Image (cartoon, helix red, strand yellow):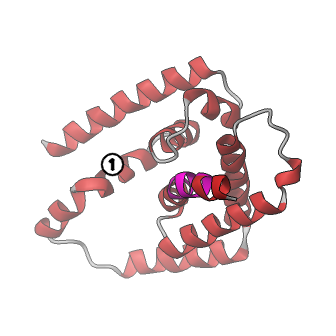
Amino acid sequence: MNELEELYKEIQPKIYAFFYVKTFDRASAEDLTHDVFYEAVKGFSSFSGKSTLQTWIFSIAKNLLKKHYRSKKYVENLKDQLAADEATPPLSPEDLYMLKEGNEKLLQQISKLDDLSREIVTLRIYGELSFQEIGELVDKTENYVRVNFHRSKLRLQKEMRVNDE
């Protein structure tokens, strides 16, 4: 049991960060993180050992995220967010400057990447998975994932510099 607790302490922040980056909602990220570990414990007997435990748990996370996106609750929340965005007045120059700082800026740039690149970058940065593990999750070779991550990282660095100027 102690080993399981240690594994949970190690993987839980990564899973939470993965969901937070995907949903931008703390409550949803917490709920989804809880659901992942519930499903993992419930289905542990089906773990075959063909991948690492961390990769297996992230595959559960990806499937739950897909299910979440298809859910009625997600669609309603998205409509509410879009309505709130339309009602929000334009930000002042000072507010825009504050918004650009820190992680918000990086998250915005990551969200502009194509789906596969965004998935690879998110799993690498926030999930802290190896290139091999990411390759297994996205059904690509380890080398493909490495090259895609490198190119995405260069693109993000370039965009971050352009926005700073």
Q: Quadrant of residue 95?
A: bottom left
Q: Please tell me how crowded label 1 is: few (under 14), some (14-19), or many (20+) other residues with Cα within 10 Å.
A: some
Quadrant of the image for the N terminus? Answer: bottom right
- In the rendered view, does 29 fall on the left or right side of 75? left
Q: Quadrant of residue 51?
A: top right
Residue 43 appears left or right of 133 = right
Q: Position of residue 44 (x, y in %)?
A: 82, 53
* Chain part drawn in magenta: 7-15
Q: Is residue 34 shown above or below 76?
A: above
Picture quarter with the C terminus = top left
Secondary structure found at label 1: helix
User: What residue would you read off at disc 1?
Assistant: 106
From the viewer's side, name the closer residue of 114 and 6: 6
* Residue 39, image quadrant: bottom right
Residue 77 is situated, as x and y percent measured from the top left of the image, at 57, 77
* Towards the viewer: 148 or 15: 15
Q: Position of residue 139 (x, y in %)?
A: 71, 31
Is residue 27 positioned above or below 39 on the image?
A: below
Q: Magenta: predominant secondary structure element?
A: helix
Q: Residue at 49% of width from left, 62% of height from top?
A: 20
Instruction: Identify whether 98 is placed above or below 128.
Output: below
Q: Residue at x 15, y 71 (%)?
A: 92
**Residue 18 image offset from top left, x and y in percent:** 53, 54
Task: Specify the amino acid type for callout 1.
Answer: Leu
Q: Nearer the viewer, residue 43 or 68?
A: 43
Residue reaching furthest front? 2
Report the residue at 48% width, 76% height from top.
Answer: 81
The question of residue 85 being in magenta is answered with: no
